Amino acid sequence: MRAQLNKTVKKLFLKNKKIFLILGDIGVYGFKELLKSKRAVNIGILEQATISFASGLSKVGFIPIVHTIATFMVGRAFEQLKLDFGYNQLNGNFISVGASYDYAALGCSHHCPEDINLLKNIPNMQIIVPGNSHEFDRIFSECYMKNLPKYFRLSSEENKLQCNVKFGKGIILNQGRDVTVVAVGPVLNITHDICKKLNVNLVYFTTIRPFDKKIFKKLKVKTKKILIIEPFYFGSVVEEVLNSNKDSKIKIENISIPYKFLTNYGSKKQHDEELGFSKKKFEIKLKKLMKSKI
């Protein structure tokens, strides 16, 4: 999605003179033309100062776009995101790369599967997990001017299926009766084809906050078995799903990143296979849930 990030930001930057681009030593070459402008700067590896600087720009009417690695943006500058933007309800656009273990070869110091769970603790923080470049362009262009802080989690993985997504809205991609699969962001390559062959619901989300609770009411059959697949730590989406379901007797299982340090070195694909983010392991887990009792 990095190429699309450059295209989208450049397009809006040239159109809207209120945009101010701030880089944290990431994507510098791709934005080399914009960095000639007084409205673009590479601050470097000073993440906490970067967020506070962006809040000052927002306070005087600019629309800051901040881009750097997830583990540095969220982990190092969480307090600034919370107080400078969340508490003050300022407009800011924070675009990360490398979340979860996209930078697998650099080891767990560069992993960030905790970003979504952390940011959900900031009231007013809007959280978007696009599944591919097309979806990022649509959602970012739609909501970058909204007067609230917004976090966009970009991944090296891209869904082949391009959905006409909207900010804050979920999409029903398949209807069935046995299980409801809740897929978040770039996981449709694993889930979509399998769900189409089976008698299951497939509900797709690119926005975690605000979460589209009403989408479940549009299902023809509201199942009592739910499988959540999310490329980050478990917990953020299950709370929303539970709040959307008034039935006390439901069974929820998940494919997500476990709460542990991933100390093995290897590629993202190797981590995916180990943790269950593959078609084969998804299908096995789904069919087992379909046969299980509540």
Image (cartoon, rainbow, N blue to C red):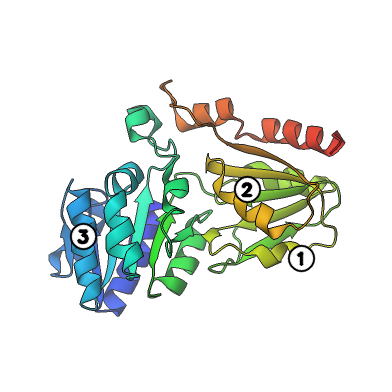
Q: Is residue 164 above or below residue 283?
A: below
From the viewer's side, name the closer residue of 98 and 31.
Answer: 98
Q: Is residue 15 visible?
A: yes
The answer to which of marks 1 and 3 sits earlier in the sequence is 3
Badge 1, how many Cα within 10 Å: few under 14, some, many 20+? few
Q: Which mark is residue 238?
A: 2
Three-letter code for the amino acid on which mark 2 is drawn: Val
Please tell me whether mark 2 sits on a helix, a strand or a loop: helix
Q: Label 1 belongs to which residue?
A: 217
Residue behind mark 3: 52
Q: Secondary structure at mark 1?
A: helix
Disc 3 marks which amino acid?
Ser
Residues under labels 2 and 3: Cα distance?
32 Å
Residue farthest to the top?
264
Indicate the quadrant containing the C terminus: top left, top right, bottom left or bottom right. Answer: top right
Label 3 Cα crowd, 10 Å radius (few <14 / some 14-19 / many 20+):
some
**Residue drawn at x 46%, y 54% as measured from the top left:** 120
Residue sitting farthest toward the front: 248
Q: Position of residue 65 (x, y in %)?
A: 29, 64
Q: In this rendering, is residue 6 above or below 60? A: above
Q: Nearer the viewer, residue 161 or 21?
A: 21
Label pair 2/3, CB-CB below 8 angstroms: no
The reply to whether the C-beta atoms of the residues labelled 1 and 2 are less than 8 Å apart is no
